[in-house]
Image (cartoon, rainbow, N blue to C red):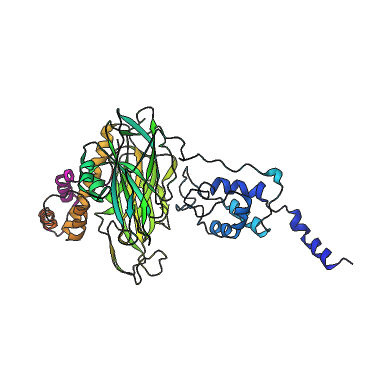
């Protein structure tokens, strides 16, 4: 009769013979390909996942966050749109991680051990053509409101260049939320900087609308070069402006941000730009979220005026953001998802690059739905109890937009798209004025949109005068007449000036 110990071993034989996953053979490839790029020394993640000992120590946590799809971070709904940079794990890999943990995290045969992954030293995309930095550190106080600060960095270009990629490294990652890049060829930014005794100069919307946008960086941004041989023109003598959004975190930090610029050896293969719906982060959308509202929704529709090829999409909101949805309805009636995100996360923002460009013929309708959760049950709720929230640049305010990056065939098509976006904003401004939403118009003016006349009340008077049939509402024709008059004043309109 076998001893109790022998009986136990016999009972375990089927499990042992099933060949439980082993670290070197099965688990290390998953970790190194999907986790180690962030979970390594010098990166944003709080601990490293390179060696067997490091992964074994965190095994339970890894199984939990992958099982709940918290990690690797990927917030677009799975199985809806195919993206080239999708970093979500397949179900089979998540199951393999679980089986390995439940088997006791065996290291396995070291004959299967592969060298630890090697990442580029310094910059993710390799040695840059030009490395620049802020001229002096900026001190972020321990307490207070969010800060939008603009820093001028001369590029000292002696000839026109074409930028294919920009990489950003915050000097104080603890307090840098996101960064926007702009170019100035007028010397205006230098003048603003010289007039402000502190490093850089303050301002949000005036910079967004006054200078030429080049892109940006958010926590979660995967550094990459522009696809399809696209590039951005940097004229001779241009200054780079970086607008840094700082969030104080309870102690003083000093930031000295650095950037790496990668040039293309030829001009952009096609003109390209961005299409934000709604424009300017939703500044004219009339965002006014009641306290306790579980799902506050804004919808927008933009009709594409010319043929476009969309190659990536991204979204933006603040802490209360929830659903981010964008669809294309083609002239033949066919409908296609461009982005479906059921659980927005302010702390991790991403560019979603389509596996192949999506052709959007003239007349395609782009429909956008953005929702916010201002209830007490929202885990990202900053106010206890909740309070009303409107549009604004602070993190405790709200915004909302979804942006397509698009290619066109000619500069004329690009100009036509920009003019359509201006008319779109003019239509929004007229609707707000007609309905007496003075606060939204004041926000827009403060944000740098050059709405004509000195007061929102004057614009309201203009909007009311367009109601020729006096039926108490603006028809499509009446709105079109007013938008045509107002559109030339919608300069800048939220970063659409990419060459």
Residue 403 appears at what percent x and percent y?
A: 34, 47
Q: Which quarter of the rendering shows the C terminus?
A: top left
Say left or right for 222 vs 104.
left
Q: Which residues are magenta?
A: 470-494
Residue 42 appears at what percent x and percent y?
A: 49, 48
Residue 250 appears at what percent x and percent y?
A: 37, 62
Residue closer to the observer: 394 or 470: 394
User: Can I make out residue 484 in this image?
Assistant: yes
User: Can I make out residue 363 in this image?
Assistant: no
Q: Is residue 230 magenta?
A: no
Residue at image position (32%, 43%) is 135
Vertical comparison of 240 with 140: above or below: above
Vertical comparison of 83 with 265: above or below: below
Residue 311 appears at what percent x and percent y?
A: 40, 40
Q: Would you identify the image quadrant in which residue 3 lies? A: bottom right
Q: Which quarter of the rendering shows the N terminus?
A: bottom right
Residue closer to the observer: 108 or 293: 108
Q: Would you identify the image quadrant in which residue 297 lies? A: bottom left
């Amino acid at each position: 009769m076998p001893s109790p110990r022998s009986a136990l071993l016999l009972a375990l034989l089927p499990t042992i013979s099933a060949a439980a996953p082993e670290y070197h053979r099965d688990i290390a490839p998953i970790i190194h390909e999907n986790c180690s790029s962030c979970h390594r020394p010098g990166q944003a993640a709080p601990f490293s996942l390179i060696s067997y000992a490091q992964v074994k120590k965190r095994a339970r946590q890894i199984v939990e966050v992958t099982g709940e799809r918290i990690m690797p971070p990927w917030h677009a709904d799975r199985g809806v749109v195919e993206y080239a940079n999708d970093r979500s794990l397949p179900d089979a890999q998540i199951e393999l991680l679980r089986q390995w943990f439940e088997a006791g995290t065996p290291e396995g045969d070291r004959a299967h051990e592969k060298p630890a992954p090697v990442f580029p030293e310094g910059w993710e995309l390799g040695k840059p053509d030009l490395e620049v930095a802020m001229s002096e550190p900026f001190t972020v106080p321990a307490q207070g409101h969010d800060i939008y600060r603009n820093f001028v960095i001369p590029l000292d270009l002696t000839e026109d260049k074409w930028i294919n990629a920009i990489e950003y490294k915050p000097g104080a990652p603890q307090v840098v939320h996101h960064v926007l890049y702009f170019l100035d060829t007028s010397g205006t930014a230098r003048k603003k900087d010289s007039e402000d005794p502190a490093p850089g100069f303050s301002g949000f919307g005036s910079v967004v609308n006054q200078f030429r946008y080049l892109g940006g960086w958010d926590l979660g941004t995967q550094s990459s070069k522009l696809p399809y041989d696209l590039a951005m023109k940097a004229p001779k003598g241009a200054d780079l402006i970086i607008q840094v959004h700082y969030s104080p975190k309870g102690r003083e930090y000093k930031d000295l941000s650095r950037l790496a610029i990668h040039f293309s050896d030829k001009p952009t293969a096609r003109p390209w730009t961005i299409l934000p719906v709604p424009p300017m982060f939703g500044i004219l959308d009339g965002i006014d979220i009641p306290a306790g509202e579980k799902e506050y929704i804004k919808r927008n529709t933009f009709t594409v005026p010319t043929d476009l090829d969309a190659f990536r999409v991204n979204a933006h909101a603040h802490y209360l953001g929830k659903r981010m949805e964008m669809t294309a309805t083609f002239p033949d009636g066919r409908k296609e998802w461009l982005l479906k995100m059921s659980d927005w996360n302010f702390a991790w923002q991403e560019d979603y690059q389509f596996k192949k460009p999506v052709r959007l013929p003239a007349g395609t309708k782009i429909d956008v739905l953005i929702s916010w959760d201002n209830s007490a049950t929202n885990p990202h709720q900053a106010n206890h109890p909740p309070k009303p929230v409107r549009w604004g640049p602070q993190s405790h305010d709200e915004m909302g937009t979804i942006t397509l990056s698009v290619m066109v065939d000619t500069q004329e098509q690009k100009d036509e798209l920009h003019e359509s976006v201006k008319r779109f904003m003019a239509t929004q401004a007229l609707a707000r004025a007609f309905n007496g939403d003075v606060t939204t118009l004041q926000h827009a003016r403060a944000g740098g949109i050059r709405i004509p006349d000195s007061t929102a009340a004057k614009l309201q008077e203009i909007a009311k005068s367009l109601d020729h049939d006096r039926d108490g509402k603006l028809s499509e024709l009446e709105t079109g007449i007013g938008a045509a008059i107002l559109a030339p004043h919608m300069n800048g309109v939220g970063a659409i000036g990419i060459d």
